[in-house]
Amino acid sequence: MSRWNQGRETIDALIASGAIEHVPASLEAAEAELGRARTHIASARLLLDSDPEGAYTLAYDGARRALAAVLQNQGLRATSRGGHIAIYEAVLAQLDPPLGSILRPFNRMRVRRNEVAYRSSEAPSVTAADVSADVSKVEALIEVAEKAIPNMPRY
């Protein structure tokens, strides 16, 4: 079996900087995270008209959990130093190409979610249409994570 090398330099650098760390690799934990990601998306759909900001936060968190699931199965986890951006950078490095176009909306959503969560008075409000548009992107991201997990290397 050949050793997976795509993104290895990025993973090694993220580990060296303390942005991600080694944890016990667990397919079971990864699948549980994917389950939570799917639940968040279902909840976001239910709330998008009545609570678009809450729905957006749930949709974003679903995306984050899907990316974290990829790392969990590999035996990796973001630290508080690395945060959500480290999860994104680690998965993107390993899967782009060819899947960057599906993964990249996460970073835009991360910035938007932070605006909503931390600067809500200054940020434009989130609409049901915003949530609906991004929920479909998160669903595609979850599908990528589900397909990638069995094929990713362990660290």
Image (tube, grey):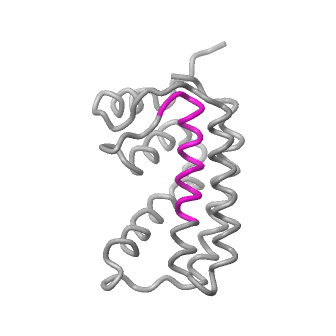
Q: Does the stretch in magenta take in 1? A: no
Horizontal and vertical percent position of residue 150:
70, 31
* Residue furthest to the top: 1
The rendered magenta stretch, by its main secondary structure, is classed as helix
Left or right, 20 with reference to 51: left
Counting from the top left corner in percent of width and height, residue 112 is at 42, 70
Quadrant including the N terminus: top right
Q: In which quarter of the image is residue 41?
A: bottom right
Image-quadrant location for residue 39: bottom right
Left or right: residue 80 versus residue 126 is left
Q: In this view, does 48 lie above or below 74?
A: below
Which residue sits at x=56%, y=79%? 130
Q: Residue at x 69, y 57 (%)?
A: 38
Residue at point 66% right, 48% down? 34
Q: Is residue 114 left or right of residue 33?
A: left
**Total number of numbered discs in the rendering:** 0
**Depth order, front residue of 50/2:** 50
The answer to whether 27 is drawn above or below residue 115 in the figure is above
> Residue placed at 63% from the left, 55% from the top?
37
Span shown in magenta: 59-76
Residue toward you, 112 or 92: 112
Examine the rendered structure and indicate whether residue 69 appears above or below residue 128. Answer: above
Image location (x, y in percent) of residue 151: 67, 29
Does residue 64 belong to the magenta stretch?
A: yes
As drawn, 138 above or below 65? below
